[in-house]
Image (cartoon, helix red, strand yellow):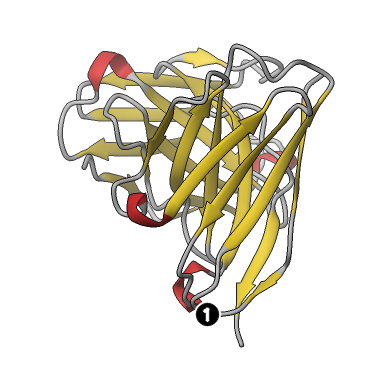
Amino acid sequence: EIVLTQSPGTLSLSPGERATLSCRASQSVSSSYLAWYQQKPGQAPRLLIYGASSRATGIPDRFSGSGSGTDFTLTISRLEPEDFAVYYCQQYGSSRFTFGPGTKVDIK
Amino acid sequence: QVQLQESGPGLVKPSETLSLTCTVSGGSISSYYWSWIRQPAGKGLEWIGRIYTSGSTNYNPSLKSRVTMSVDTSKNQFSLKLSSVTAADTAVYYCARGGGRFDPWGQGTLVTVSS
């Protein structure tokens, strides 16, 4: 099983600031099969990024993903009020898909 | 625009079988993988398994002995059965399109295991 670790656990920032979220895998993620999701309270997760760096349909370009192997990053270039949420990374490069524990981005 | 909706009992007794159905609207269920994912209150996400419209399945090894998934293409639905449930199976259960990355998701349904 590939274990994903996300850091920091909580990120306190102000609107307009840049957010950098990290996801580290216990072993290399095949073919960069790494996705990022956003979840707001009471809602289902929403796919933001797949293939480590491809934005899903309708996702604003302030969201970007990068990385390969075991280290991946989600960057939100300028936080909008609607971006304060929990973010999960997920790998689908092995036969057992796993999620990270999440990073909460809250308002400072 | 494809939409998914979970349905099923919100309360299941310990040792019994949890049964949920996901109805797909706005598009065909054919030629896609479909997955179930769950989330205990205040916790993270756990992938339960996936099914292709041919009926081929892959399950999370941690749940494999208790999980059965099926698909009914005539109704544009797929289903989850989880047997021998305990309180640890209490969670919001989501259905989603995809066999790797998941998009879109249903709104989720809370299933509580309690006597």
Please identify the residue farthest to the left as the structure is shown.
A27
Residue A22, percent across and down? 34, 38
> Is residue B80 left or right of B5 when viewed as pictured?
left
> Is residue A97 left or right of B109 when viewed as pictured?
left
Do we see residue A48 in this rendering? yes
Q: Residue at x 71, y 56 (%)?
A: B109
Front one among A87 and B52: B52
Residue A103, percent across and down? 45, 50
Q: Quadrant of residue B73?
A: top right
Above or below for A101 versus A98: below
Above or below for B80 versus B42: above
Badge 1 marks a residue whose secondary structure is loop
Q: Chain of mark 1?
A: B
Q: Quadrant of the N terminus of chain B?
A: top right
Q: Residue at x 45, y 40 (%)?
A: B49
Q: Residue at x 21, y 42 (%)?
A: A1
- Reading the image, the residue beneath label 1 is B14
Above or below for B90 versus A35: below
Number of marks drawn: 1
> Is residue A74 left or right of B54 when viewed as pictured?
left
Circle 1: is it few (<14), some (14-19), or many (20+) Cα within 10 Å?
Answer: some
Front one among A61 and B8: B8
Residue A23, percent across and down? 32, 38
Do we see residue A46 in this rendering? no
Residue B59, percent across and down? 38, 40
Above or below for B77 versus B30: below
The amino acid marked with disc number 1 is Pro
Q: Quadrant of the C terminus of chain B?
A: bottom right
Q: Residue at x 57, y 64 (%)?
A: B91
